[in-house]
Amino acid sequence: MENKKTYYITTPIYYPSDKLHIGHSYTTVAADAASRYKRAQGYDVMFLTGTDEHGQKIQRKAVDKGVTPQQYVDEVVAGIKELWKLLDITHDRFIRTTDQQHVEVVQKIFKKLYDQGDIYKSEYEGWYCTPCESFWTERQLVDGKCPDCGREVELTKEESYFFRLSKYQDRLIQYIEDHPEFIQPQTRQNEMLNNFLRPGLEDLCVSRTSFDWGIPVSFDDKHVVYVWIDALSNYASALGFMTENDSDYKRYWPADVHLVGKEIVRFHTIIWPIMLMALGEPLPKQVFGHGWLILEGGKMSKSKGNVVDPVILVEKYGVDAIRYFLLREVPFGSDGVYSEEALVNRLNSDLANDLGNLLSRTVTMIDKYFGGVLPAFVDSKDPLDASLIELAEATSVKVEDLMEKLLFSNALAEIWKLVGRTNKYIDETMPWVLAKDEAKKARLGTVLYNLAESLRITAVLISPFMPNTPLRIFEQLGIVEDSDKVWASVKKFGALKAGAVVKKGGIIFPRVEFAKEEPVKEEPKKEAKQAPVKQEEAKKEEKAAAADPGYITIDDFAKIDFRVAKVLECERVEGADKLLKLQLEVGSEKRQVVSGIAKHYKPEELIGKYVVLVANLKPVKLKGIESNGMILAASNEGALTLVAPVSEISTGSKVS
Ligand code: MSP
């Protein structure tokens, strides 16, 4: 253990917003794949994730819910932990910024910076954006709003402590220029240098007095530490930095990579490195800012329903399919459009067709032609075999190179070239033709061995991305030796021993029919494709929307199609004393609706009356009678009245 090479990787710590969506899972699944890969390479990995629990935003949410901030975060954090379990995330440590050790470390960091003069007391007068937890000067505002998210900012005037960012600005510019690998991808480095560092840094306000859900400044407890100073410190506090038990810090720091979404690169490549410089600590080796998964309409939020709910998606398609999709669909670093349809397409083509069929064909043929027992490897020198073997042996080298650069999608594309080549090998060698000729039995055996061995190599290579599928492949191929399942075994074709007994199992990826959900109505788009800054806005809006848990959006409301309707006929439903069957006119259309209002209205009273109909409610049968919609009624303690337009208007008119 001691002489193993270490690899320290982190995700951002998540805000405990009510529910995470599939976009949130992206960083964590990526960090998990990188961690599993490094472990497979023999590294001693420390993979850290956690939750960012302090700040004004969380305090307000808790107040809205009528609970204490601690109660609020405890509940949400439990859900986040469950989600990571569901996605097979193998983090080694989970930090919460409410953990006592973290609190103490942040206080020590703050005190040290204060004692050495890097933090000083003054007064803050300026603007604060609560959804972003960001300070802005008058000059930085855009049309008086937050330049990041476009929301209202609050004028803040309070006694505050300040951190001398400006003192370290030139050192940081020099460091970034000397270490081109520090900020990745390259475009983000240019953005940081040109937009923030070279124009000049202002000292940062690092404490607040207007609320108390935060870490108190140890020597002045009417102040709490600014939430980003608190949050960024997690990467060191989780390892015991500045505590008696700092062996993990000594072992793993500096971090190999902080994986973060592009909107928080600024905090990780300016504030955090300057904190570390001021503390005299080495900087992380790399900050990698990945892009966002966006929905076709631009923003992703839980209000978009099941299509973005990772729990529902995992239930529907399985963990490995979701992980594969996240890592394959979008090059890490770029933005990508997410849709459930694209997910289903990938699942059907890459997983069910390419990989799943390859396995089932291979196992079926070994079963049929060799009684289920794997024939021996023969180095045949046949050019078809040679080309397959050459690609299989080269693939791991390419995957390793790409994984070092965190290019997950490209790594998977290389593995799927091998899958494609192996499928093509079946077409080229035509085992079913060889099987007809007894004299070609040995050749048939070699072909089937090569298929099984290529699949074994594929299974090992996909294991960082999809932890469950390799186990099923090994099982069906009858591979039991651990030595055939490890990364080192993929370098040389032919490791698989003859005599393995294959076991036909279920289809590993059944094809899925895609049923499109009712599209969520969007406000009409002014631009077909959103410019990056719009996406930034969209993302921030989405974050802020999550702060109003009880509200629905105008988009939610627009999903319901309310129409004015007129009752043409009405009768009682036999055997149901509460139900009336109504025939309605809705514009040019006729509708039958069954309604539970028989105790309040006689059928004849309603004929000719105008009502309001929910026209797009899924049809149901009540007492065997089809009901196509619902009419609105107000009720209160046993009283009930139908809702109707106050003056006459044509039926079919939209109510909104
Ligand atoms: N609490 C801060 C991070 C502090 S780290 C010291 C935070 N939390 S967050 O919950 O808002 O975001 C966590 C991560 O999820 C970020 O890396 C963010 O970029 C990522 N994503 C949130 N929505 C996303 C998509 N739609 N697509 C890809 N990643 C997304 O920021």
Image (tube, rainbow, N blue to C red):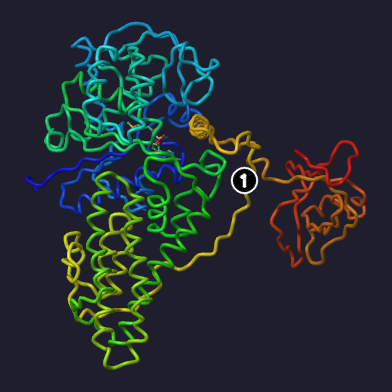
Q: Is residue 341 above or below residue 358?
A: above
Q: Quadrant of residue 104?
A: top left
Residue beneath the point at 67% across and 45% down: 559
Residue 75 seen anywhere in this rendered image of the structure: no
Counting from the top left corner in percent of width and height, residue 101 is at: 22, 31
Left or right of 205, for residue 588 = right
The amino acid at mark 1 is Val
Q: Nearer the viewer, residue 428 or 42?
A: 428
- Find disc 1 in the rendering and name its residue: 520
Q: Is mark 1 within 8 Å of ligand 1?
A: no
Residue at 44% over, 12% down:
137
Q: Nearer the viewer, residue 458 or 571?
A: 458
Q: Is residue 616 left or right of residue 248?
A: right
Secondary structure beneath label 1: loop
605 vs 247: above or below? below
Mark 1, Cα crowd under 10 Å, few <14 / some 14-19 / many 20+, is some
In this orientation, does residue 388 appear? yes
Quarter of the rendered structure image containing ligand 1: top left
| Location of residue 6 with respect to 120 vertically, above or below | below
Nearer to me, 37 or 221: 37
Taking depth in this image into account, of 248 and 437 the one nearest to the observer is 437
Task: Give the residue drawn at x 37%, y 26%.
Answer: 191
Q: Name the residue at 35% across, 76% down.
A: 426
